[in-house]
Image (cartoon, rainbow, N blue to C red):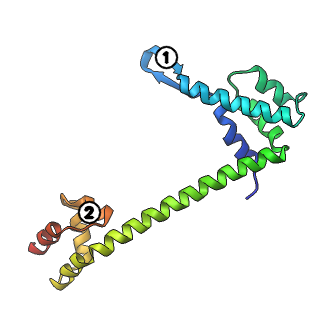
Amino acid sequence: MSTTVKNIFNYIQGMNPNSQTVSSIGTFVTAFSQQVADSQISEVIQVLVNADKKETLAFKIASTNTTFSEKQLWVIAFELEKIQEYAQNVNSYYEKQALKSKQKAQESKDKLATNKAGSQSELDRIKLAGKKLGDYYAWLKKSSFKKEFFNKKYSKESVSQFIAL
């Protein structure tokens, strides 16, 4: 996966602190949000200084402003794309994020499969009673046991109630 300007732009959007709106009082920036933005700004400035990019427009924008327009962030992103080391850091960040999300999805699938395998005896009871699993699932979604449908942990109580119908 190669780093695109869009990836770098998304990565440096943290330079703008997040503001929160509180009804009619207005908007404000939390101290934590400002610290995150300041650290992102100092990181960008340091990268530009280390790459001898002090004379660029991106450096002037990053070193003089505290909030940035979208156009200013794009200027900075285009300049940072030219710095190979920074582009590799951004690329590795997004690869780690993708790996984490894949692992989380796989863990979720494994958990559901484990739950369903553990409840297989209950599903077999339904089949032995001559009922269809599709009917059980439809009933389960409408009953007070609907949580079981989503986590695939079928209880004896829900199966007994369904068979009794």
What residue would you read off at disc 2? 148
Q: Do the residues labelled 1 and 2 touch (CB within 8 Å)?
A: no
Instruction: State left or right for residue 86 relative to residue 125.
Output: right
- The residue positioned 64% from the left and 29% from the top of the image is 37
For marks 1 and 2 on the same chain, the one whose residue lies earlier in the sequence: 1
Q: Which amino acid does label 2 sit on?
A: Glu
- The residue positioned 54% from the left and 27% from the top of the image is 32
Placement of 82 over or under 71, stated as above or below: below
Comparing 99 with 8, the one in front is 99
- The residue positioned 18% from the left and 80% from the top of the image is 125
As drawn, the label of residue 26 is 1
Instruction: State left or right for residue 127 relative to residue 92.
Output: left
Q: Which amino acid does label 1 sit on?
A: Gly
Question: Which residue is the extreme one toward the left?
Answer: 164
- Label 1 neighbourhood size at 10 Å, few (<14), some (14-19), many (20+)? few
Comparing 27 with 154, the one in front is 154
Q: Choose top left, top right, bottom left or bottom right for residue 148.
A: bottom left
Placement of 100 over or under 40, stated as above or below: below
Comparing 25 with 91, the one in front is 91
SS category of the residue bearing label 2: helix
Comparing 157 with 130, the one in front is 157
Instruction: State left or right for residue 86 relative to residue 37.
Output: right
- Label 2 neighbourhood size at 10 Å, few (<14), some (14-19), many (20+)? some
As drawn, the label of residue 4 is none
What distance separates the C-alpha of mark 1 from that of mark 2?
Answer: 44 Å
- Which quarter of the figure is the C terminus placed in? bottom left
- Percent of width and height locating residue 115: 32, 69
- The residue positioned 81% from the left and 44% from the top of the image is 81
